[in-house]
């Protein structure tokens, strides 16, 4: 009987070992896998495209990993400024070597993504394709920390007579904070309908629903003529895309407060720059601009 029990235990261990070979074990690849879906989304139509745009300065080779109905990996090379389209009804894994490690990303049907540089000049994949007509969002949704928002309001000297605009407003925290703490009016511009619903709900909750409004609009097509101050957290390429809009619409003396990123070519208009220490060694830079007198 004892011998039978021992044989049974040995067989069980053998089964576990075999399963481990097929299932795999977490390693470096698992640690380097990023799911690019920050919030639940509604189901997508079958075959809806995910798009990948290359906004770096060199071609990028990447691999589409095998999935249902797809037995082998597919390797593609994406040229600079080109958009690749992946028709799928399920999330798809892609991987590429960014020069330091092989990264794996889970991208989702119907969403735009881009290869671009991070703050350390390393290429990564981000949600959003930043200003293209086929996917017109200007930046991935990354909320500005509330302590940074507070300091941006202080540096911009936001007051009750101001009309504050936030282009790509995310959850609306900048214009809501300006209205709640400074008594200003505000306009948030955003493309994501789910985020717009969050904005409006948060404004009502904070008691500033009559001071702020939120518009579903491509920021590159917005009119900013009544703005007295812009609060922005956008990528450099997006700020460069919007620069003609600023020049066209903003009156002399209008302030622009940018989180982290400079407006390319506008160094002469910088009034003040401040760095705020953040968590995990991540500093936040605030840049204040003022529109010059028009000639």
Image: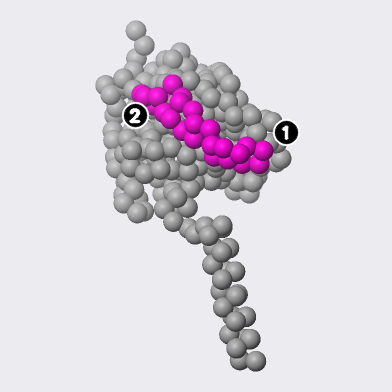
Residue at 66% x, 41% y is 68
Q: 184 or 103: nearer the eye? A: 103
Q: Which residue is found at the position 64% from the left and 46% from the top?
A: 40
Q: Is residue 196 visible?
A: no
- Mark 2 → mark 1, Cα distance in angstroms: 39 Å
Query: Considering depth in this image, is 172 or 293 the residue closer to the camera?
Result: 172
- Relative to the observer, which residue lies in front, 148 or 153? 148
Mark 2: give few (<14), some (14-19) or many (20+) Cα within 10 Å. many
For residue 189, above or below residue 154: above
- Most common secondary structure along the magenta stretch: loop
Secondary element type, mark 1? loop
271 lies left or right of 78: left
**Element under disc 2:** loop
Q: Residues within 10 Å of mark 1 (few under 14, many from 20)?
A: few
**Residue 22 screen position, x and y as percent:** 56, 57
The disc, 2 or 1, on the residue closer to the chain's N-terminal end is 1
In this view, which residue lies farthest toward the top?
295
Query: Which residue ends up furthest to the left in the rendered image?
Result: 268
Specify start and end residues of the magenta stretch as a single range: 55-79
- Which residue is found at the position 58% from the left and 40% from the top? 66
Residue pointed to by mark 2: 262
Q: Quadrant of residue 261?
A: top left
The C terminus lies in quadrant: top left
Examine the structure image and report whether residue 72 is included in the region drawn in magenta.
yes
Residue at x-position 44% and y-position 15%: 244
In this view of the protein, can residue 9 be seen by the observer? yes
């Amino acid at each position: 009987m004892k011998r039978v029990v021992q044989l049974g235990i040995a067989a069980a261990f053998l089964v576990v070992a075999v399963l481990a070979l097929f299932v795999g074990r977490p390693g470096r690849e698992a640690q380097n896998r990023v799911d690019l879906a920050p919030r639940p989304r509604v189901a997508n139509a079958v075959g809806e495209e995910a798009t990948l745009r290359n906004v770096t300065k060199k071609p990028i080779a990447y691999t589409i990993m095998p999935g249902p109905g797809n037995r082998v990996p597919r390797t593609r090379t994406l040229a600079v400024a080109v958009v690749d389209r992946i028709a799928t009804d399920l999330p798809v894994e892609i991987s590429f070597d960014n020069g330091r490690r092989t990264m794996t990303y889970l991208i989702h049907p119907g969403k735009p993504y881009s290869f671009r540089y991070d703050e350390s000049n390393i290429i990564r994949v981000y949600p959003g394709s930043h200003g293209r007509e086929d996917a017109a969002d200007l930046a991935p949704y990354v909320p500005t920390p509330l302590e940074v928002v507070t300091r941006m309001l202080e540096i911009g000297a936001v007051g009750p007579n101001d009309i504050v605009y936030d282009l790509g407003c995310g959850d609306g925290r900048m214009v809501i904070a300006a209205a709640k703490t400074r008594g200003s009016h505000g306009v948030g511009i955003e493309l994501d309908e789910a985020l717009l619903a969050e904005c409006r709900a948060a404004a009502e909750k904070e008691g500033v629903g009559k001071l702020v409004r939120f518009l579903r609009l491509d920021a590159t097509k917005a009119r900013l003529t009544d703005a007295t101050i812009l609060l922005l957290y956008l990528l450099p390429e997006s700020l460069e895309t919007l620069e003609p809009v600023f020049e066209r619409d903003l009156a002399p003396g209008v302030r622009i407060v940018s989180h982290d990123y400079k407006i390319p070519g506008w160094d002469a208009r910088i009034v003040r720059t401040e760095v705020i220490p953040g968590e995990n060694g991540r500093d936040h830079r605030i840049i204040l601009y003022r529109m010059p007198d028009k000639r």
